[in-house]
Image (spheres, helix red, strand yellow):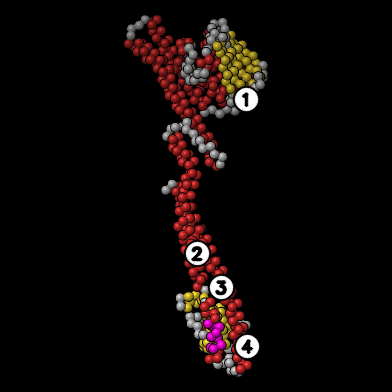
Amino acid sequence: MKFWQKLFLWTLIIFVLAFDAGAYILTTHACSFHQQREMENGMREQSIILTSVSERIANLKTIYADASENEERLAAMLKPLTEYYQPQGVLLGLYDGEKAVAGELAGFDKDLLRLPGAAHKKTVEAVIGGKRYAFVASKLPDDPHLTLVYARDVSQIDVFRKDVSRIFVILNLVVVPFIAAAIYLLLRHMNRPIAQLNQMTAEIAGGAYDKRVALHRNDEFGNLEKNFNRMADSVEQHMAQLTQAAEDRQQFIDDLTHEMKTPMTAILGYAAFLQQAKCSEAERDMAVTNLYDGALRLKNLSDKLLELAYLRGEKIAMEEVDTAALFRDVESATRQVLAERDITLTAQADIPFVHGDAILLLSMLTNLVENAAKASGAGSCITVRAFREKAQVLEVQDRGCGMAQSEIEKITEPFYRVDKSRSRQFGGVGLGLSIVAQIARLHGAELAIDSAPGKGTRVRMYFTD
């Protein structure tokens, strides 16, 4: 059963119970109030009749001294009163102890006649001939051996109770279906946003990450809509990242396979050549040299991959790194590469230190200088600078061949090369700038690359203070 259906049933059940309980309480209270009023009226009327009876007996005593003891005279005295009040639904009886001396009444508990004194009254309800009567009994003040019993027909209370109950039954039959229909329509209307959210959730779960909820409400459902859409944005963004990561991983594997294939093919080919062919010393030297170059490329590839793997899990401790000493280490690490290409390295430290990891910063600058050397011709100059421009900056600039803007956007991807033939010629594997980007990320720094074809390249690493 759906939530709105449960809510509908429970709301309807609670309403019916509350309505019926209210009707019962109201009916009971009204009947009790009516009954109390009838009893009070009966007691007042009984007091009036009691006074009249006492006066009549007193008058009879002036003529007959035994008037209060003579049953016939008492019955004759009470008869006019009985005939007068009977059409009004009132019965009268006069008792001497528990013995009826005039107007005997039946159907009530004789305990009503046991009164402790003349000033006391007793009341009780009883059914006589299918009718409900309210009984009131009290002793005559001047003749305490006599008790006047007054019975008033209060059957209209039962009629009233039945009429009110019938009205509420009719109201139940009319109002409850109307209320049920109103609750049903209201809950269906209120459940519409939940249904829309449920539908969107199912569609997003099915892969439609671009779906969004549009409720246009200013209540709690409106807040739920905003939070849901923010969650959907986050899910879509994370799914895009996961998709991109999977594509990058597959591309990385494809590129790695391709990079390994070329030197491995060369190594296997020249190894087979040396094993099987009869060759001259010069040919043997050429084969050995090519074997060495292939093995060196595999070693460089392995070293770069290990460095990338190390950087992905690395957490660095920031410290002050002396820029002058850092540049000397860079010059020492790149001296052979620069000498082979007849390239000059110029270092300029305008700030005494930068905050970072000395080993990682040396690796980053070494990779940048080596890349710059590959892009520069003989006799060129590469500049390494450390200065402040709102924040600490490390810069490597060359005057080499440069690259287009479309190349800059891809240059930090693993195995990406602007000029593949030139990179392989100088032993590159296309991972240098990927390592540089990882080191910048670990330092919380921004990597900015400016380049243009024929005008060289400038790479800056902006530190956050």
Identify whether 45 is placed above or below 221.
Answer: below
Q: Which residue is located at x 63 percent, y 17 percent?
A: 386
What residue did someone put label 3 on?
38
Tell me the CA gap for discs 1 and 3. 94 Å
Mark 1 residue type: Thr
Q: Nearer the viewer, residue 255 or 339?
A: 255
Q: Nearer the viewer, residue 326 or 194?
A: 194
First reached walking from the N terminus: tag 2 or tag 1: 2
In this rendering, the label closer to the viewer, 1 or 4: 4
What residue did someone put label 2 on?
164
First reached walking from the N terminus: tag 4 or tag 3: 3
What residue did someone put label 4 on?
142
Q: Which residue is located at x 35 percent, y 6 percent?
A: 279
Q: Nearer the viewer, residue 48 or 81?
A: 81
Q: Position of residue 66 (x, y in %)?
A: 58, 94
At label 2, counting other C-alpha atoms closer than 10 Å, the crowd grade (few under 14, some 14-19, many 20 or more) is some
State which quadrant residue 452 falls in.
top right
